[in-house]
Image (tube, rainbow, N blue to C red):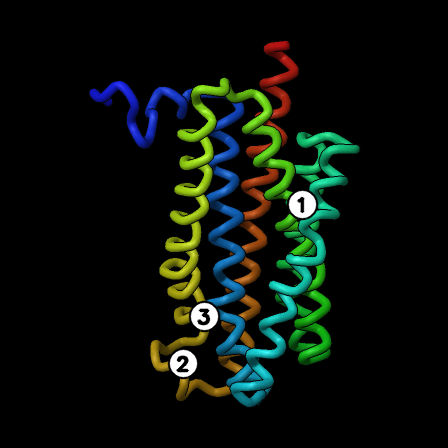
Amino acid sequence: AKVASPLVKLALLRDRVLAPSLAMNALVSTVMMATLVVGPFFLSRALGLSEAATGAVLSIGPVVSAVCGVIAGRIVDRLGAAAMVVAGLALMVAGCAALTALPGLFGVAGYAAAIAVLTPGYQLFQAANNTAVMADVDRSERGVVSGMLSLSRNLGLVTGTAVMGAVFAFAVGTSDIAAAAPAAVARGMAMTFAVAAGLVVVAVAIAVASGRRERCSA
């Protein structure tokens, strides 16, 4: 608030584009962290996979993310950032909903299918959200704004670890997940991603409201 070139420029938080984007970034990162926190417990405890098999299944998300990254960027360039923010979030809602049901019905195949929907949605959102923010930023502010985007993402990851982990433990009914019954772990998984779907719906609402404000101001 006092220095000429702060690491976090508080005045930018009043920006009609940046502020909603930071909020959505934090919410989405919270949800994605849940896959890393809850996923291993579900795969190993509820589905009974070995450590190696659990790691192999968890690698599906990063592999899909790497494959979809460039594609997502090109889609955003062709179709526009604002529309693709909403489209990416919609895919994430579908992926979270799938994670509440498909793994319990189809096991590893259901988990993999849900992740294959969730992760491209995340990549599309990230590409569109970053593009929407950086396109309207003054050249002198790009470093600060880029850092704020990274900060919001990291805050979301920390929140996802703590809050979504707590939701999972609450739904399982014990803090000792290693001793929990497979059915309880499966129930915790479904509950966690039901909450995650709700968080992404909040992000969709922010995106829609932000788009309306921009059209009105235009």
Element on which disc 2 rests: helix
Q: Residue at x 31, y 31 (%)?
A: 7
Mark 1 surroundings within 10 Å by alpha-carbon count, few (fewer than 14), some (14 through 19), many (20 or more):
many
Front-most of residues 8 and 175: 8
Mark 2 surroundings within 10 Å by alpha-carbon count, few (fewer than 14), some (14 through 19), many (20 or more):
some
Q: Residue at x 39, y 58 (%)?
A: 163
- Give me the disc on residue 124: 1
Depth-wise, is mark 3 or mark 1 nearer the camera? 1
Q: Residue at x 55, y 77 (%)?
A: 186
Report which residue position mark 3 lands on: 171
Determine the image quadrant of residue 73. top right
Label located before the other in sequence (2 or 1): 1
- Give me the disc on residue 177: 2
Contact between labelled residues 2 and 3, with CB atoms less than 8 Å apart: no
Label located before the other in sequence (3 or 2): 3
Element on which disc 3 rests: helix
| 191 versus 122 height, above or below | below
> Quick one: quadrant of the C terminus?
top right
| Residue occupying the far left of the picture | 2
Looking at the rendered structure, the kind of residue marked 3 is Ala
Looking at the rendered structure, the kind of residue marked 2 is Ile
Element on which disc 1 rests: helix
**Residue 59 image offset from top left, x and y in percent:** 60, 71
Front-most of residues 41 and 2: 2
**Residue 183 image offset from top left, x and y in percent:** 54, 83
